[in-house]
Image (cartoon, rainbow, N blue to C red):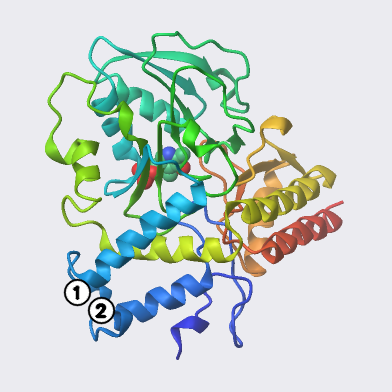
Amino acid sequence: MSVFNSPTLSGAEGKGSTSVVHNFNAGPSILPKVVFEEAAQAILNFNNTGLSILETGHRTPVFQEVMDEARVLVRELMNLDNDHEVLFLHGGASTQFMQVPMNLLDEKDTAAFADTGVWSTKAIKEAKLFGKVEVVCSSKESNFTYIPKDFAVPNDAKYLHITTNNTIYGTQWQSIPKTSNSLVADMSSDIFSRVLDFNSFDLIYAGAQKNMGPAGVNLIVINKNILGKVKRSIPTIMDYRNHIKEGSMLNTPPVFAVYVSMLTLRWLKAQGGVAAIEKLNNEKAALLYKALDENPLFTGTVNKEDRSKMNACFVMKDPALEQSFLQFTKEHGIVGIKGHRLVGGFRASLYNALPISSVEVLAQLMKEFAGQHA
Ligand SMILES: *Cc1c(COP(=O)(O)O)cnc(C)c1O
């Protein structure tokens, strides 16, 4: 049996007689099929070395090439200038909730935060351990169903932190707030999904497992000029400057996660880069939201203008039907659309690697289900 025929491997173009799976998981989530194939091969024989990548030293030239290529691909795809450094670090985005303020915020300093969901709230909690926090806007009172528009950031705030896409609630900043302050962004769930002026951010972080690779690695893009300004002593492993100096190889990096992320970035470049994938992402989101808005049984959970193109959240007007819709879609190969417990209903994640054909199937099933329950 070939592992590539397994129905648990995602992609609407699954081979052979196995049934097709449409993977709408929120994270870890779908990656390109060709990436799974290459990664599987590298586990058996990495670059014809006769060794698995899992038993290959991180200081070897073959792995150094992987790290170098991954970092160069990030620079290219994000169009970064020379002030911005690219790091791949351990710990998931949650580690950045702590590492960012540890490096940027002294005890007497203030950081400004936009509170737009669970992940922002967690980032706020950690920042308070290192300095003062001013929450400059929040949509908490409405269970985070919108992105706040009018708010002011104190001039002396060291930085403004935003979560560009709110994975759980399904909202997304359609435009990045203009501020004279340093801008820090958690882009875990929409990194590489749309063109932004990435150089206008002083620090971007993203856990890989939503849109860039497997769990186990973070991408950090950082303007090196903002570092070295705090008075506290920073533990070696937490100080970005040490990672920059060592080319993201201060200690053993998460070798396999970096490798699979590099393969995904290569794939993205071959698709035409971020602008090309953004066009597709726009089409996928438009298709799903149209199916949602036309359907009498369903309703979206957030402000239309703030809808996320990565995570579409919706509920049924009659919650008693939700279980049966879930079962109906499951029978047709749909995976991962159960909503987060804080929102309920459904969440369809439409990350870069999800083919539009999968969205077409889900849209069609919503329509059919409505036909059966009209
Ligand atoms: C998933 C997610 C996180 C948490 O990532 P971990 O890697 O599990 O720490 C943080 N922020 C956002 C926006 C996320 O989607």
The residue type indicated by label 1 comes to Glu
82 or 12: which is nearer to us? 82
- Name which residue lies at 27% across and 46% down: 91
Q: Position of residue 343 (x, y in %)?
A: 56, 37
81 or 267: which is nearer to us? 81
Q: Position of residue 289 (x, y in %)?
A: 75, 46
247 or 277: which is nearer to us? 247
Residue at the front extreme of this rendering: 82
The residue type indicated by label 2 comes to Ser
Residue 313 in view (yes/no): yes
Residue 63, picture quadrant: bottom left
Q: Position of residue 307 (x, y in %)?
A: 67, 37
Q: Is there CB contact under 8 Å for labels 1 and 2?
A: yes
Q: Which mark is residue 203?
A: none
Asked whether mark 1 and ligand 1 are closer than 8 Å, the reply comes as no
The quarter of the picture showing ligand 1: top left
- Name which residue lies at 30% across and 85% down: 48
Residue 61, picture quadrant: bottom left
| Crowd tier of the residue under label 1, counting other residues whose Cα lies within 10 Å: few below 14, some 14–19, many 20 or above | few
Residue 59 relative to residue 172: left or right: left
Residue 7 relative to residue 237: left or right: right
Would you name the residue on which mark 2 appears? Answer: 52
**Could you tell me which secondary element the residue under label 2 belongs to?**
loop
Q: Position of residue 234 (x, y in %)?
A: 15, 30
**253 relative to 266, above or below:** above
Residue 280 relative to residue 108: left or right: right
Q: Which mark is residue 55?
A: 1
- Name which residue lies at 23% across and 56% down: 253
| Crowd tier of the residue under label 2, counting other residues whose Cα lies within 10 Å: few below 14, some 14–19, many 20 or above | some
**8 relative to 178, above or below:** below
**Could you tell me which secondary element the residue under label 1 belongs to?**
helix
Q: CA distance from mark 1 to mark 2?
A: 5 Å
